[in-house]
Image: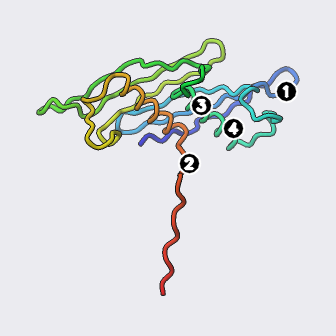
Amino acid sequence: MLEVNTRSVTYNLDDTVATTGIVVSLEGYNNSRESANMTIILASEDLPSGTKFDDLSRTQIIELARKKAASFINPAADTTPELDVNVDSIAYVLDKTSSDTKSIAIALKGYSTENRNNVNLSVNLTPDDLEDGVALDDLSRKQAEALARKKGADYVNPPAETTAKEAPAAAV
């Protein structure tokens, strides 16, 4: 599991000290050689209708930045993302004795000179990421990329729990 944390939140101000944008830096590293290093620029069009930058709490700012980062990493099929995040490298890590694939390391990168959004993400796919009966060696490059994008987006913006935890039954 890769835990992606907020490193900084910086307000961009104009000459009148009005907020023109917010820069959020996200990062995370783990012992499985997965990493995330992102700079997400929130612009006025990223805000909910009728909301101004200065109306947002830090928690709301981070939530917006995480959603924007996830949309860069794993864009919806019918959208054109503001930032193209592409596969930078794919490396298969093989078992020394069987030569079966133990993991697939996929690096995703994107940078915009126009608005300075930046995504660098390394994700390792393991057999635990696959459905039963499917091996890493069975995946095409496109399938591995799709899984890495989903896993990376979930690291940055974890999905909400879909089922509520049940309270323990009362003792009789």
Q: Is residue 103 left or right of residue 146?
A: left
Q: Mark 4 sits on what residue?
A: 61
Name the secondary structure under disc 1: loop
Q: Name which quarter of the figure residue 138 lies in.
A: top left
Q: CB atoms at circles 2 and 1 under 8 Å apart?
A: no
- Whichever of callouts 3 and 4 sits on the residue coming sooner in the sequence is 3
Three-letter amino acid code at the position of disc 2:
Ala
CA–CA distance between discs 2 and 3?
Answer: 22 Å
Image position, residue 48 (x, y; %)? 76, 35
Q: Amino acid at mark 4?
A: Ile
Locate the N terminus by quadrant. Answer: top left
Of marks 4 and 2, the one in the foreground: 2
How far, Cα to Cα, is label 1 from label 4? 19 Å
In the image, taking residue 76 as reference, residue 90 lies left or right, namely left
Q: Give the mark nearer the N terminus: 2 vs 3.
A: 3
Closer to the eye: label 1 or 4 = 4
Residue corresponding to mark 3 = 25
Rendered view: 80 above or below 149: above
How far, Cα to Cα, is label 2 from label 1? 36 Å
Label 3 packing within 10 angstroms: few (<14), some (14-19), many (20+): many
**Residue position marked by numbered label 2 in the rendering:** 160
Query: Which is more N-terminal, label 4 or label 1?
Result: 1
Please give the residue where the numbered disc 1 appears in the rendered image. Answer: 17
Q: Amino acid at mark 1?
A: Val
Dot in front, 3 or 4: 4
Q: Amino acid at mark 3?
A: Ser
Q: Residue at left 58%, top 35%?
A: 7
